[in-house]
Image (spheres, rainbow, N blue to C red):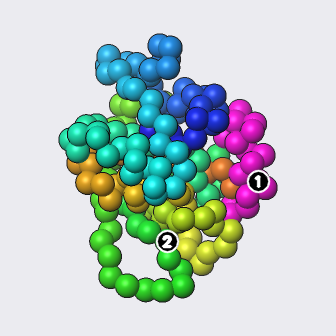
Amino acid sequence: MIAEAGDFIGEKKLIAQHLQGHWEGNQWRMNDGTLWEVIVTGVGALNVMQTLRNIPLDAPLINIGYAGSANYDIGSVVAVNEVRLNHPCVNYPEPTLLLTPVQDSYLLHPKQVLTSVCYSNTDFVLQSDYTDCVFDMELAYIAGLGFTQLSALKIVSDNLSLHTYREVASGVEKA
């Protein structure tokens, strides 16, 4: 799953840079023969829910895309192990959603992959006191739908800078 159709060329490069396998048209074939369809969710909660509402909850899914981080280096690869919503102005009880680890056999460089929590937000995160984590705008909503085999691989595009995100996303070879 990727967020934006406009990012499809860049996301295809990210997938090829970090996952074992190769492209067959607009599908990704893993070295074990598994063939993955690419689903474009759209950005944000409503797009995610509308796009994924008819996907079986036991379908194996990998969300791959960019994320911001307050302190991880740009270009870092992060396998997300849990996801939460980011709401810095209020505190209330809500679940932490655990994800299925990305299989090492899927990764080109598994020893270079960090493991971290992801906080999903409704807007681009420009500042945060949270460190050793990543921020996106979709993953918590995807996980909240109840998928039982959901994994996520995030590439750090910025250190909470919309300008840097745009630069990295437009020149994906840097990631």
Which three-letter amino acid code belongs to the residue tagged 1?
Thr
- Residue 142 covered by magenta stretch: no
The residue at which mark 2 appears reads as 86
Q: How many marks?
A: 2
Q: Is residue 61 above or below residue 120?
A: above
- Residue 161 covered by magenta stretch: yes
The residue positioned 58% from the left and 41% from the top of the image is 4
Which three-letter amino acid code belongs to the residue tagged 2?
Asn
**Along the viewing direction, whichever of 81 and 143 lies nearer the viewer:** 143
Instruction: Give the percent coordinates (x, y) of residue 94.
Output: 32, 76
The residue positioned 23% from the left and 39% from the top of the image is 56
Q: Residues within 10 Å of mark 1 (few under 14, many from 20)?
A: some
Quadrant of the image containing the N terminus: top left
The residue positioned 44% from the left and 20% from the top of the image is 27
Q: Is residue 114 visible?
A: no
Q: Secondary structure at mark 2?
A: loop
- Mark 1 vs mark 2, CA separation in Å: 21 Å
Instruction: Give the percent coordinates (x, y) of residue 50.
Output: 40, 47
Comes first in the chain, label 1 or label 2: 2
Q: Which mark is residue 80?
A: none
Q: Is residue 125 left or right of residue 110?
A: right
Instruction: Give the percent coordinates (x, y) of residue 130.
Output: 55, 74
Q: Residues within 10 Å of mark 2 (few under 14, many from 20)?
A: many
> What's drawn in magenta, residue-wise?
159-175
